[in-house]
Amino acid sequence: MNTTFLKKLGINKIHSGAFDGSWRKTKGEVLDVRSPINGKVVGRVRMATPKDYAAISKKAHETFLRWRALPAPQRGEYVRQIGNAFREHKELLAKLVTLEAGKIVQEGLGEVQECIDIADFAVGLSRQLYGLTIQSERDQHHMRETWQPLGTIGIISAFNFPVAVWAWNSMLALVCGDANIWKPSLKTPLCAIAMTNIAAKVLGKEWAPLVSCVIGPDLTVGSALLDDAKVPLISATGSTRMGRIVGPRVAQRFGRSLLELGGNNAMIIMDDADIDLAVRGIVFGAVGTAGQRCTTTRRVLVHHKIADKLQARLIKAYKSCKIGNPFDKKTLVGPLVDEGSATAFQEAIVKAKKQGGKVVQGGKRARVAPAIKGGAYVQPTIIRCPKSLPICKEETFAPILYIIPVRSLDQAIEINNDVPQGLSSSIFTNNVRSAERFASATGSDCGIANINIGTSGAEIGGAFGGEKETGGGRESGSDSWKAYMRRQTTTVNWGTSLPLAQGITFGS
Ligand code: UN1
């Protein structure tokens, strides 16, 4: 595979794993970075140590102290230029996402577009960041609520969105007046190096430590980040298992965490649904990114009257999905990230069968061209279940779809909600009552409840995240920016006396 383009993104043969304005001379172990496409090493990173981390944190904090004083629209101007730099590098970055995360080219481009979009969104926000004015009970007084910069934000990101999730967090954090330290997945450090280089170049020497980056082992460098009292917010995306460690650990020091963890997303297909739309929505949601999105469609809850028909349509559509090299324009399904994921895929299928599920499509490792044999390619799989089985409540990060027939909307909503996770959900129906019921207080309990579109592929303008074991955090659009700031209440007395609240008289 041709990797000469890495040079254009400033990635060296053995790259340093610690950035605090410039790439430090790290002393940690060397990490081999493998492409999921063929399992071959495409880069090397000399990882950071806790000592590197300490230096980075200090510099980020010092830079934050100056950055927070800059008017927010001036901060936004830097972010505007960073967004433009992402635009200029869109193709190259997408290529890197494909190489390192194994996404097909279209999805790689889409991911970089998310970075551009959130930068644009953040620029607009930089002239807003609205607070409130509040009536005071005291004469010649008024109250206001303002939003102030928070500090250095720790960003922990997963392999499956190796550039966008950082951008969601860091572009908002920058306009909010914060610095950030990025700890990317050890499976996709090259994407982090490239993004850091692009943003740092725009920020220049004075501000580059705002986009610090640390690539190192979870147990040493990750722990240092979690325990760092100078990092008031940790925004972590990844597994529920990871979130269970991050949440309590950060809370222990009264830090905040913004968690975006696993999903187990269902699509409800009613008997009045537009089946053509539903099939397209399911295929993109379940097969796209080889089933490795936190928003991937994992369950189809279909009205029993149309279950067989829908299943037949899906099988037909699945058979036409080309599996293979994600650089090949015809490919729709690239590799899983590594062998471990392929093993989890196979184990889930064995379990599902034992529990009464029937594999009606796929179920095996996929046969691919010899040149990419080293990758973990699997067949997108459909398992028909007589009812919701225990395995249907688990998130397996692979393209496995459970089809579960339901008798009514009530039952569909009940099964939709009867899982530990609560990220995304959707309904396909042409009945406005069913649609609105699904997205009401008595409907889906997820952070995302879509109508006549799939569970994945959210736009950046909405708040993104979910409930229960998904972690409760919201990032990206809407008012998610508030997580990156501290709220301040100010009461102003513009009169000549000092009345106390609650009518208290104190002394004379
Ligand atoms: C993730 O998988 O962590 O809605 C994020 C989507 C994407 C983001 C997924 N915009 O599928």
Image (cartoon, grey):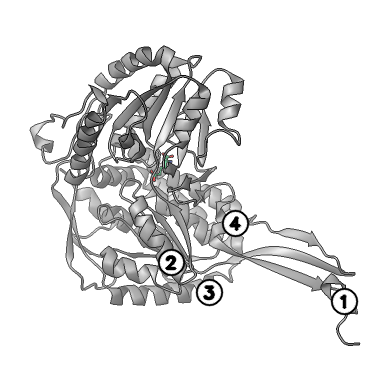
Name which residue lies at 14% across and 42% down: 38
Q: Whole-percent x and y of residue 241?
A: 33, 53
Which residue is pictured at 78% across the width and 60% down the height? 134
Circles 3 and 4: CB atoms closer than 8 Å: no
Lower position in the chain sequence, tag 2 or tag 4: 4
Q: In the displayed structure, would residue 255 be above or below residue 425?
A: below
Q: Nearer the viewer, residue 208 or 472?
A: 472
Residue occupied by mark 2: 250
Which amino acid type is marked by label 4? Ser
| Numbered circle sitting on residue 454 | none
The mark nearer the N terminus, 1 or 2, is 2
- Structural distance between the alpha carbons of marks 2 and 4: 28 Å
| Image position, residue 399 (x, y; %) | 28, 33
Residue behind mark 1:
499
The picture quadrant where one finds residue 181 is bottom left
Q: Is residue 327 visible?
A: no
For the residues carrying marks 1 and 3, which lies nearer the camera in this image? 1
Residue found 30% across the figure and 49% down from its top = 159
The quadrant of the rendered image in which ligand 1 is seen is top left
Mark 2 crowdedness (10 Å alpha carbons): few <14, some 14-19, many ≥20: many
Q: Nearer the viewer, mark 2 or mark 4?
A: 2
**Quadrant in the picture for the C terminus:** bottom right
| Mark 1, secondary structure of its residue | loop
Q: Are marks 1 and 2 in contact (CB under 8 Å)?
A: no
Q: Which residue is mark 3?
A: 66
Would you say the beta carbon of the disc 4 residue lies within 8 angstroms of ligand 1?
A: no
Badge 1: residue crowd in 10 Å (few <14, some 14–19, many ≥20): some
Q: Would you place residue 350 above or below residue 317 in this image?
A: below
The alpha-carbon separation of the residues under discs 1 and 3 comes to: 37 Å
